């Protein structure tokens, strides 16, 4: 089976699971994104094994998922935060008893994983509660559907346009196959999907969807490059082999980790205008 066919089949299965989670509402979506947090955090920590860096691992993954839940379900005052801070402090004690040679480095990677993965995925989930009036307490899958339609279109268009017409390299030292032609082509197609979202989904007006499209196009591509820089520094091609033809879940969501927080901040300020 060709790599392209593997990519297509695994993409269909991944998208189907994602759509099912959104369709059944707030709780299934929370579980879905929590599961993604768990897998991505585990993959992230596994990247560093070859460099003899030892993030705390299982304990940190559990705390990381707890951190995701604390941030994702934050509505007004919450008693989760003191408990979360206590758990983070306890991870330092866990590292003390591991008696590793580089405790500061190990803890830095441990906390970096939570910041890089759990916080953006929590903000991504919270996008489902946004409307033109700002943050609400009602989950609306339209926002997340629209966001991912833009992201997937941007990624796909950038891949095929870059493969066909890419001449000028975007950042050859980090990702030799990415080109400026693919970058701008992805943004252009993403903007078209943004306009289509304004027709399909009434949650935002056309201007807001176009702004979201531009943010996702730019910062989604930068997120891809950020993860590529991590993997290149560690001499690793894929975060895992969990998804045939794609690598790991971390590889599939690299554009989310930078773009989702930016979209969240943009909606926060746009809703206050």
Image (spheres, rainbow, N blue to C red):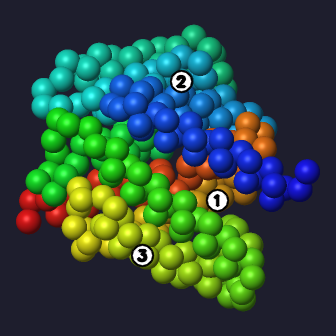
* Residue where numbered disc 2 is placed: 61
Image position of 136 (left or right of 121): left
- Closest to the camera, between mark 3 and mark 2, is 3
Instruction: Give SS at disc 2.
Output: helix
**Camera-nearest residue between 211 and 1:** 1
Marks 3 and 2, the one that precedes in the sequence: 2
- Closest to the camera, between mark 1 and mark 2, is 2
* Residue where numbered disc 1 is placed: 229
| Mark 1 vs mark 3, CA separation in Å | 27 Å
Q: Position of residue 270 (x, y in %)?
A: 17, 63
Above or below residue 270? Residue 23 is above
The residue lying at 26 percent from left, 72 percent from top is 206
The residue lying at 33 percent from left, 52 percent from top is 143
* Residue where numbered disc 3 is placed: 191
Q: In what quadrant of the picture does the C terminus appear?
A: bottom left
Instruction: Give SS at disc 1.
Output: helix
Q: Can you tell which quarter of the image residue 221 is in?
A: bottom right
Above or below residue 270? Residue 206 is below
Marks 1 and 2, the one that precedes in the sequence: 2
């Amino acid at each position: 089976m060709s790599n392209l066919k593997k990519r297509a089949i695994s993409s269909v299965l991944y998208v189907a699971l994602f759509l099912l989670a959104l369709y059944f509402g707030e709780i299934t979506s929370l579980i879905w994104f929590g599961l993604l947090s768990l897998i991505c955090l585990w993959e992230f920590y596994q990247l560093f094994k070859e460099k003899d860096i030892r993030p705390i691992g299982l304990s940190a993954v559990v705390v990381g998922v707890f951190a995701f839940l604390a941030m994702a379900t934050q509505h007004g005052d919450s008693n989760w935060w003191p408990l979360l801070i206590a758990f983070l402090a306890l991870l330092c004690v866990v590292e003390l008893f591991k008696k590793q040679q580089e405790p500061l480095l190990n803890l830095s990677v441990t906390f970096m994983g939570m910041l890089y993965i759990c916080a953006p995925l929590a903000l991504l989930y919270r996008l489902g509660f946004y409307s033109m009036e700002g943050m609400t307490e009602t989950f609306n899958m339209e926002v997340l559907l629209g966001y991912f339609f833009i992201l997937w279109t941007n990624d796909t268009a950038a891949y095929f346009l870059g493969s066909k017409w890419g001449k000028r390299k975007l950042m050859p030292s980090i990702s030799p196959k990415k080109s400026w032609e693919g970058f701008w082509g992805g943004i252009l197609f993403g903007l078209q999907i943004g306009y289509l979202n304004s027709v399909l989904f009434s949650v935002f007006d056309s201007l807001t969807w176009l702004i979201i499209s531009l943010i996702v196009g730019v910062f989604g591509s930068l997120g891809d490059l950020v993860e590529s820089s991590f993997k290149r520094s560690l001499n690793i091609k894929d975060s895992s082999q969990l998804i045939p033809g794609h690598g790991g879940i971390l590889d599939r969501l690299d554009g989310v980790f930078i773009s989702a927080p930016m979209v969240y901040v943009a909606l926060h300020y746009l809703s206050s205008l």
